[in-house]
Structure formats: C-alpha cells, structure tokens
Amino acid sequence: MHPGPGPLALVGSGEYLAVMAGVEGALIEGRPRRYVQIPTAAAPEGPDRLRYWLDLGAAQAERLGVQQVPVVVRDRDEAGSEDLAALIAGAGLVYLSGGNPQFLARTLRGTRVWAAVEAAWRSGAALAGCSAGAIALTDWVPAVRTPARAPEPGLGVLPWLRVLPHFDRMRSWAPDLATRAAAGAPPGTTVIGIDEDTAIVDLTGGGRSWQVHGRQQAWILAACQDQGTGQDRGTGQDRGYWPGSGYWPGWRYRPAVPGRHEYKD
C-alpha cells in the first residue's frame, strides 16, 4: 500500500458506469484489488434501490478486474458493526455512492464503519464519493430539495470545499442551491460545481490539487454583480467563464484551469 493518504475523488454522477470506469480504474491502480462499495445514501429508498447500486457496482468491479466488497450499512446500528467495519480493511478503493447526502453523513459520522474508512484512506486506499457521497465528504451537507431544512455536518474529509454535483442539471432541481452554498461559508471555502459524468481527482490525497476527468467540466463559483457579461463593472476585465443556459445566472464560473483541466486550491 502507498504510504500516507490515498487519492481522493469527487464525482458529479456516473458511479459504477462504463463512462467512469477509467476514473475508478485509475484510483485503484497499484492498490489492493478490493473495491469497497458503500450504498448507504440509497438506504431510505428501500432494498430494491440498494440492490440496484450493488448490481451496478458488481458490473464495474468485473469490468475493472477487481473484487467487489459490498458494505451494506442501512442505519447507525449497522454502521457500528465490527463485522461490517472489518470488511473495509485492505481496501484499494472505497466508494460512497449516491442518494440522500444528509442521511449518508448522519448514518456514518462517528461510527466504527466510518473510522475504518478513514483508517483505510489514511493508510493509502483511494476514497471517492459520487453525488450524495461527494457532498458528504465535505463539512456542509444541505437538504438539496428542501431549502428550509438546515445543512448538517458532513464527514469532514474536505471541510474547505462545498460541492454541487450534477452541476449541469441541478439548477432545475434546486434553483437556490448555489446561493445556499455560498451563504455563511467560512473564509477560504471554495464552492465547486461538478458536471455529470465528471470527476475531480487529487492523486496526492491532500484535497487541494485537483484534476478534472470525464465527459464534462468542473466549475469554481463566485458571486457576480454583473450578471450579463462576466466582466467587472468599471474595469471591463474578464472575471470568469460562462457555461450554458442550464447553470445559475448571477454567478461567474471559472473552469478548473482551462486547457490543463486542473484546479489547485
């Protein structure tokens, strides 16, 4: 196993699909061929949805030529299980898949299973989260479709980030989410949107030097007074890049270092 923390990946969508096999394969490359898959975020949707994620994960593991290790945690009692936590030992890649981000963070935070995940990552295993899983790895976990509900603490791996997955489509689901992400953000916090079928990956494990992989792009957000041109008032200087009409107006977007597909915090 590699010394120190393993790679990190935050994914906009597409976990366990062929379109993201290259990303998942790169994360586990050179590491034990044990692919731990934790579908907890989908548990509120019932056993059929859990089976859906496990079947997708099995297909991806076969595609990559690695061993699928399902760790099915449906509640905090199961998250406290020594037997389930023991399954994480020796992982090459641990993946938190999509569903309900608040349920995921609330269920795992402070449990034996999460302690085992953290220990595996700090010992060199790669750690990835997609959609709800990506949000939960930060320390800001909103109720995406329920603006009135307060955000909750996350799992705290990346407390300096606030993540908006499905970014190219999320405006139609949660039109105020970018504003909520920026509201009250501590100094030094970066709000980053990740399009579908796209991941940001930090191979160093430090969480501050990211490369963009996949079909689309990732975007660094900042509030913009001039909603029409992407230029500073009075200076005419370009302040960023404007993606398509599916994104939020009133914000400027800077792709992760255009041309190099890299974002350094």
Image (tube, rainbow, N blue to C red):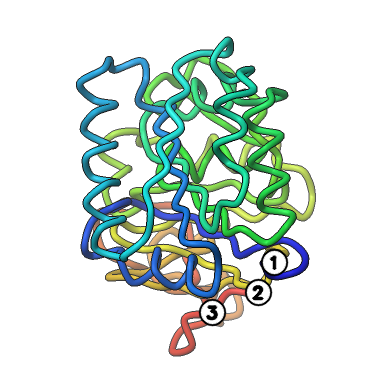
Give the class, few, some or many, for how many residues have Cα within 10 Å of label 2's Cα (few <14, many ≥20): few
The answer to which of marks 1 and 3 sits earlier in the sequence is 1
Q: Taking 61 as reference, is 106 left or right? A: right
The answer to which of marks 2 and 1 sits earlier in the sequence is 1
Q: Amino acid at mark 1?
A: Arg
Asked which quadrant contains residue 145, the reply is top left
Quadrant location, the C terminus: bottom right
Foreground of the two, 94 or 201:
94
Disc 2 to disc 1, how far (Cα)?
A: 6 Å
Q: Is residue 238 above or below residue 125?
A: below
Q: Amino acid at mark 3?
A: Glu
Asked which quadrant contains residue 72, the reply is top left
Cβ–Cβ under 8 Å for marks 3 and 2: yes
Answer yes or no: is residue 151 visible: no
What label does residue 264 carry, if any? Answer: 2
For disc 3, the marked residue is 262
Q: Amino acid at mark 2?
A: Lys
Residue at 73%, 45% (x, y): give it: 119
Residue at 26%, 47% (x, y): give it: 58
In this view, which residue lies farthest toward the bottom? 259
Residue at 36%, 15% (x, y): give it: 44
What label does residue 208 carry, if any? Answer: 1
Q: Position of residue 207 (x, y in %)?
A: 68, 62
Q: Taking 4 as reference, is 29 left or right? A: left
Q: Position of residue 214 (x, y in %)?
A: 33, 70
Q: Secondary structure at mark 1?
A: loop
